[in-house]
Amino acid sequence: MNINNMLNDYEEMGKKNGNNGNSAEELRKQKEEELQKKIDEACRQKDKKAEYEAFKRMPLNTMDMTLNDIKNTWSVEESKQVDKAIKFVYDFNKLDTGLYLYSKQSGTGKTTLASAIARAVFKHQSVPIFYGSEEYILSKIRETYQENSSISEDDYIKKIAKNKLVVIDELGQNVSDWSIKTLKRLLDEMMNYNSILVVTSNYGLNDLAIRLLNNQSNNENRTVTQLLDRLKGMTEPVKFGDKSFR
Ligand SMILES: Nc1ncnc2c1ncn2[C@@H]1O[C@H](COP(=O)(O)OP(=O)(O)O)[C@@H](O)[C@H]1O
Ligand SMILES: [Mg+2]
């Protein structure tokens, strides 16, 4: 058999194996595609994990309500608040103040709107968000005092504060000196990172001032005033109606 026949034979063998005689190139392409698929899948898993971490503390009954759903189902009395939320998400990258959603009455939609805002900012503006109740945040910070804690109080506060959007649900429940001081520290860190704050509360800022000052010893009044100043500076008040939907 001469060389030419031999080469022909190899080519035929390649075709039979489905390599079309171009096996190295084909194989490389195939490997590349497989690798890309694996990378894409890993990214999807990472995104899913980030989303899970960001959303896991939102009340379950608010999870399937997008801002659009809210706009389409809530009555006109709330349309001002809902429009404000939509504009907030749209303008997020240009904002320098957040929102303070409040009403004395509970069941008026504050938490539902705040969690929809946070999901929309996460998805449409692709920025890291933190969502948690005041109670949760304070209890996690308290945990850092334990001897076996893997993170310091300072680092935990920074970890929350550096999310571009931080939502604190039900602010104003805790009135102790330590709670006020700790929340003030969190807001100070948020200002360092230029993060945006969204709060829900059953107390407007004046009612919150009365509530907190009534519970403080005289030498802690300054911290209350500082906390209230931060809240005032970092958010725009949005009042909700008094009708409960619970
Ligand atoms: N304006 C509204 N129209 C219809 N349902 C509403 C409205 N506001 C709130 N709800 C519903 O009422 C329930 C309680 O709302 P929530 O957001 O927890 O209130 P809040 O945080 O003010 O206590 C939720 O199931 C929510 O979907
Ligand atoms: Mg609520």
Image: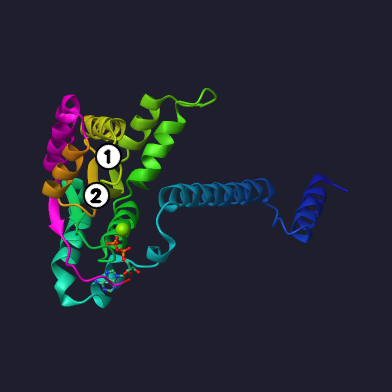
| 207, above or below 183, in the image | below
Of labels 1 and 2, earlier in sequence is 1
Q: Which residue is farthest right?
A: 1
| 40, above or below 75, in the image | above
- In whole angstroms, how far apart are the C-alphas of marks 1 and 2? 16 Å
Q: Whole-percent x and y of residue 54? A: 41, 48
- Callouts 1 and 2 close, C-beta under 8 Å: no
Identify the residue position indicated by label 1 in the image: 175
Residue under the image location 27 percent in, 39 percent down? 175
Tag 2: residue type?
Val
The magenta stretch spans residue 200: no
| Circle 2 residues within 10 Å: few <14, some 14–19, many ≥20 | many
Quarter of the picture holding the C terminus: bottom left
- Which residue occupies the foreground of this view, 97 or 101? 101
| Circle 1 residues within 10 Å: few <14, some 14–19, many ≥20 | some
The magenta stretch spans residue 237: yes
Identify the residue position indicated by label 2 in the image: 199
- Which residue occupies the foreground of this view, 100 or 128? 100
- Which residue occupies the foreground of this view, 218 or 238? 218
Left or right placement of residue 72 versus residue 14 in this view: left
The quadrant in which residue 155 appears is top left
Residue under the image location 15 percent in, 30 percent down? 221
The region drawn magenta spans 216-245
Tag 1: residue type?
Val
Q: Quick check: which quadrant has ligand 2?
A: bottom left
Is any atom of residue 129 visible in this view? no
Is any atom of residue 77 visible in this view? yes
Left or right placement of residue 69 versus residue 238 in this view: right
- Which residue occupies the foreground of this view, 154 or 211? 211
The quadrant in which residue 244 appears is bottom left
Question: Does dot 2 land on a helix, a strand or a loop?
Answer: strand
